[in-house]
Image: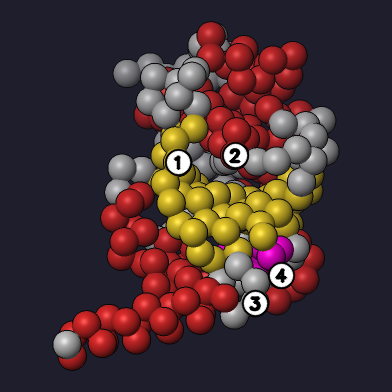
Amino acid sequence: MKHPGPAESVSPPPAATAVFGDRLDRAEAYYSLLAGDGVEHGLIGPREVPRLWERHILNCAVIGELIEPGVVVVDVGSGAGLPGIPVAIARPDLRVTLVEPLLRRSEFLYRTVEELGLDVSVVRGRAEEKVVRESVGGAAVVTSRAVAPLERLAKWSAPLIDAGGRLVAIKGSTAMEEIDRDRVSVERTGIGQLHVEECGGAVLETPTTVIVGTKQALGAGASRARRERRSRRAKEKG
């Protein structure tokens, strides 16, 4: 099968206009970068090119529905810039930082941000590193997409989120299963009120499934987890 490259781009679907508005040209330029350099550098599989708009760019951009105006957003394990760059294009009011540990990917992000003229920062490093935490901590929202299982993701993300801020993680059909499996360990990190939300239902044929959690006051998550463990032990003994 022949896949479209940067000189053979696929026209954006109608939903793209609804999501990106007068910044659609930047979204189209991002599409071209993903379909070209993104594929050449192994950041996007060639078979994904025909699905870039629906499955990647729009799928990520719509999570902006869950983010308040003008806040600081940190995208961990950003990779090719998903979801951080589509969110930044659709929501220029946000202050977005992309965190990516791998050199090749971070270099792609630097080039992309510059070429698209986005007011977005790129930090090369791992979310769990002290220097990264000191650099980007205190975010209102930490986003991610296909980075790690929920338990591990929460450990990396929680230190970056300010009290009252939120974890917004794009997941698939097993999102509720992840919550059921990892709820107690996630709450130990201070992230509670875990639930599943769908974004983009008004514009996408398949809405984006997202796990959302709120960073509690210091110690609140651990205290709740301890209460739940005591409750379970009491029931087992009873």
Q: Which residue is mark 4?
A: 133
> With 125 as the anchor, is 223 left or right in this view?
left
Q: Amino acid at mark 2?
A: Leu
Residue 165 is covered by the magenta coloring:
no
Residue at point 46%, 57% (across, down): 194
Q: Which mark is residue 66?
A: 2
Q: Which-is-in-front pick, marks 3 and 4? A: 3
In the foreground, 84 or 223: 223
- Kindly check if marks 2 and 1 are in contact, taking CB atoms under 8 A apart as contact: yes
Using the image, determine if residue 18 lies above or below residue 166. above
Using the image, determine if residue 48 lies above or below residue 172. above
Magenta segment main secondary structure: helix
Residue 66 percent across, percent down from the top left: 59, 39
Is residue 34 in view from this perspective? no
Q: Which residue is mark 3?
A: 218
Q: Which-is-in-front pick, marks 2 and 4? A: 2
Q: Earlier in the sequence, mark 2 or mark 4?
A: 2
Residue 168 percent across, percent down from the top left: 55, 49
Q: Which mark is residue 173?
A: none
Secondary structure of the residue carrying numbered label 2: helix
Few, some or many residues within 10 Å of mark 3 (<14, 14–19, 20+):
few
Q: Earlier in the sequence, mark 2 or mark 1?
A: 2
